[in-house]
Image (cartoon, rainbow, N blue to C red):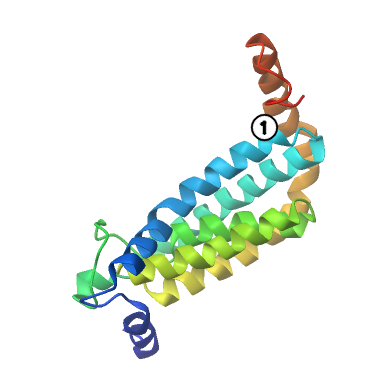
Amino acid sequence: MNPLNEHLFLAINAGAHPPPALLAFGLFCAQWLVPLTVALFVLLWIRLPRPEHRAALITATAVMLIGLGVNQLIGAFYFHPRPFVLHLGDQYLPHPADNSFPSDHGTFMWSLGFALLALGRLRAWGVAVILGGFAVAWGRIYVGVHWPFDMLASFCVALAVAFLARPLLRPVERWALPFFDTPYRRLIELLHLPPQAFPR
């Protein structure tokens, strides 16, 4: 165990008697920011019909999936137990005793955010997702299911795969965007969904 990793974890972890409001916020960050980010991407797809915006959303999603694939590859060669397995700190979120390094939650958030920044599209949303990634990182350490170095590794993985965003953009615009966008437009027309809520 890296002493610095352990020291940082104990400094961030909630401890035995956390303030109830802070613990509730930590659990919210740890559990709900990732699904809320998925909902955000769906909402952006619906509300921003311009091809360059939808291509950016698809590209960022592809980059995120690559990042999660890198995590799986790292996990196949290196296993790191979670803090509660080593009886360190206090755990407030049930979790399987699987590999902790890197964090899929962190990679998910930061890959999406960095990809949007790399593309130069939807930058404000990219910054928001990156900041959300820091909240997720803090929350999952605070509730005792991740180490700080897990999050540092996720940050590095996300930063690395974000460099793929620009090379991926052209094939996404040519192939993936029509594949997803055309059926979507046909569906909302078929369902007679109002243009005010579902812009064409």
**From the viewer's perspective, is 118 left or right of 27?**
right
SS assignment at label 1: helix
Q: What residue did someone put label 1 on?
A: 46
Q: Is residue 137 above or below residue 121?
A: below
Q: Residue 65 at what x, y percent from top left? A: 56, 48
Q: Residue at x 72, y 25 (%)?
A: 196
- Position of the N terminus, as image quadrant, is bottom left
Q: Quadrant of residue 161?
A: bottom right
Q: Residue at x 29, y 72 (%)?
A: 19
Q: Residue 73 at what x, y percent from top left? A: 46, 58
Q: How many marks?
A: 1
User: Which amino acid type is shown beneath numbered disc 1?
Assistant: Ile
Q: Is residue 118 visible?
A: yes
Viewer-closest of 153 and 110: 110
Q: Quadrant of residue 10?
A: bottom left
Q: Residue 195 at what x, y percent from top left? A: 73, 21
Q: Is residue 85 above or below residue 167?
A: below
Q: Residue at x 79, y 37 (%)?
A: 173
Q: Is residue 146 visible?
A: no
Q: Is residue 46 above or below residue 145?
A: above
Q: Is residue 3 above or below residue 75?
A: below
**Label 1 CA crowd tier, 10 Å (few <14, some 14–19, many 20+):** some
- Position of the C terminus, as image quadrant, is top right
**From the viewer's perspective, is 52 left or right of 63?**
right
**From the viewer's perspective, is 142 left or right of 149?**
left
Q: Residue 47 at what x, y percent from top left? A: 70, 34
